[in-house]
Image (spheres, grey):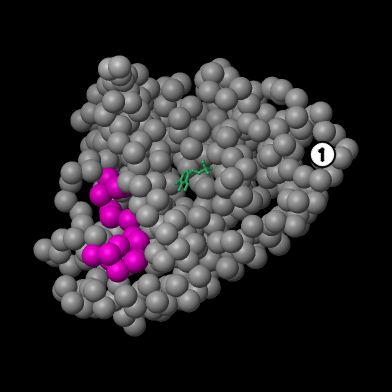
């Protein structure tokens, strides 16, 4: 049989991160390449108790079909969280429960982007969403990152120079992969530029609650009096990624179309998972839980940075994130980053080559991503020491 794959999928490669993660399933490999929440950050007992209560008291609600927009009590709880916790005025926006932030990127593309239209993203950016954009056969263009967020002059230039720019995708808090936080001034400038040129902003904020230093900054959505921001939130990093629950807050006409798009994809998000998240938000001390997990990541990031300061040569640069799960290391001029990642993997330490996160995966890149949430403390110490030894041999 000859299989004729669609143009949308034919050129799409399996995510480099997923491929590397396959290697990290080997227990001997130190998993700096992963992006999983730390095992001790999962509220296992609360989830087990709540799931038991739901299945004992309201089993059919949890097991029956439901509406695409999402479980109403959860939508109410999320609206209240958005207003009170994230300080985003809901205004006339609609809200839909989605099966993780990743589905938000998919639905935004499905609703707004025709083949050949342009999507702009930060360069580097989250590979999962980049691959999702690619699957719509769009013109994907990366805009360079600086230490305080995207280069806004280059953003405006990219909007002017590319045809049919439909979306600018941004991760303002503790970006994946760099750990960079976009400054408030740049958030306002991004909003101003996109408004001027009629470009929708896709603001993806899965890590916003994982802040362990610095003051929190207003989300771009909180400025949105003009209906140009699709804000995506997720419970993957504050409750559990396996539950696949997130939400999109966006102008009502966009939510209406996203709802139709979601109907075709998965009808609705898993009901039991939605009900568990609703009870978790309304019946437990969510603020205390968030403070607890932010502290886990503060400690682990500090440990990794201290080890790096001790072990890596000064010619290797790294970001110092104020939250999230990742930091981004850059090798000295002339270094062969892929060769470094390959030898590191041979020595049983997995990091992600930076090219995986570029809009153009063939562009030159001397950086790699390291994750501090997945490995144990002991693995962080040992893994950074192995990488340090390799770096000293090579550079
Ligand atoms: C920036 C970013 N957006 C979205 C996602 C996907 O999250 P979810 O599990 O909510 O689909 C991730 C996951 O790592 C991410 O890093």
Quarter of image, res 75: top right
- Residue at 21% across / 78% down in the picture? 392
Residue at the (59%, 61%) spot, across then down: 39
Q: For the point 75% across and 57% down, which residue is it?
A: 45
Residue 349: in magenta span: yes
Asked whether residue 6 is drawn in magenta, I would say: no
The reply, left or right, for residue 183 in relation to residue 77 is left
320, above or below 242, in the image: below
- Please identify the residue farthest to the front as the structure is shown: 1
Mark 1 crowdedness (10 Å alpha carbons): few <14, some 14-19, many ≥20: some
Residue 241: x and y in percent read 57, 47
Q: Position of residue 4 (x, y in %)?
A: 29, 17
Q: Is residue 249 visible?
A: no
Say which residue appears at 16% left-offset and 74% top-offset.
Answer: 395
Q: Is residue 334 visible?
A: yes
Image quadrant where residue 15 sits? top left
Circle 1 — which element? helix
Residue most toward the right? 57
Taking the view exactly as shown, the residue that stands out farthest to the bottom is: 310
State which region is magenta: 343-358
- Is 106 drawn above or below residue 39 in the view shown? above
Q: Which one is in front, 219 or 126?
A: 126
Q: Image check: 297 left or right of 172?
A: right
| Residue 286 occupies quadrant | bottom right
Nearer to me, 52 or 256: 52
Residue at the left extreme of this rendering: 334
Where does the image place residue 206, in percent across and percent down from the top left? 52, 48
x, y percentage for residue 258?
53, 23
Residue corresponding to mark 1: 55
């Amino acid at each position: 049989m000859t299989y004729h794959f669609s143009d949308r999928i034919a050129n799409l490669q399996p995510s480099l991160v997923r491929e590397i993660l396959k290697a990290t399933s080997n227990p001997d490999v130190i998993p700096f390449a992963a992006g999983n929440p730390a095992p001790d950050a999962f509220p296992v007992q609360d989830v087990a108790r709540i799931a038991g209560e739901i299945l004992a008291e309201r089993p059919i609600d949890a097991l029956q079909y439901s509406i695409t927009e999402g479980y109403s009590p959860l939508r109410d709880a999320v609206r209240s969280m958005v207003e009170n916790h994230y300080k985003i005025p809901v205004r006339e926006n609609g809200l839909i429960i989605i099966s993780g932030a990743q589905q938000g990127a998919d639905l935004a593309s499905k609703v707004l982007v025709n083949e050949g239209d342009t999507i702009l993203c930060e360069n580097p950016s989250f590979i999962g969403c980049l691959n999702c954009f690619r699957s719509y056969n769009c013109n994907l263009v990366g805009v360079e990152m600086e230490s305080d967020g995207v280069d806004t002059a280059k953003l405006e230039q990219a909007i002017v120079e590319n045809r049919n720019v439909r979306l600018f995708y941004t991760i303002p808090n503790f970006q994946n992969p760099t750990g960079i936080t976009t400054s408030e001034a740049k958030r306002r400038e991004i909003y101003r530029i996109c408004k001027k040129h009629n470009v929708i902003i896709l603001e993806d904020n899965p890590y916003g609650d994982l802040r362990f230093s610095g003051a929190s900054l207003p989300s771009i959505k909180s400025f949105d009096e003009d209906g140009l921001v699709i804000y995506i939130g997720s419970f993957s990093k504050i409750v559990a990624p396996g539950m696949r629950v997130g939400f999109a807050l966006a102008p009502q006409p966009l939510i209406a179309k996203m709802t139709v798009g979601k109907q075709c994809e998965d009808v609705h998000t898993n009901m039991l998972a939605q009900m568990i998240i609703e009870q978790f938000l309304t019946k437990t001390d969510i603020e205390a839980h968030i403070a607890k997990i932010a502290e886990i990541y503060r400690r682990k990031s500090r440990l990794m940075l201290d080890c790096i300061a001790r072990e890596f040569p000064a010619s290797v640069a790294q970001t110092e994130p104020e939250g999230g799960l990742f930091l981004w290391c850059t090798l000295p001029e002339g270094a062969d980053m892929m060769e470094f990642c390959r030898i590191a993997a041979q020595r049983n330490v997995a990091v992600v080559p930076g090219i995986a996160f570029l809009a153009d995966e063939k562009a030159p890149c001397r950086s790699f991503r390291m994750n501090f949430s997945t490995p144990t403390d002991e693995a962080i110490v040992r893994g950074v020491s192995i990488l340090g030894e390799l770096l000293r041999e090579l550079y």
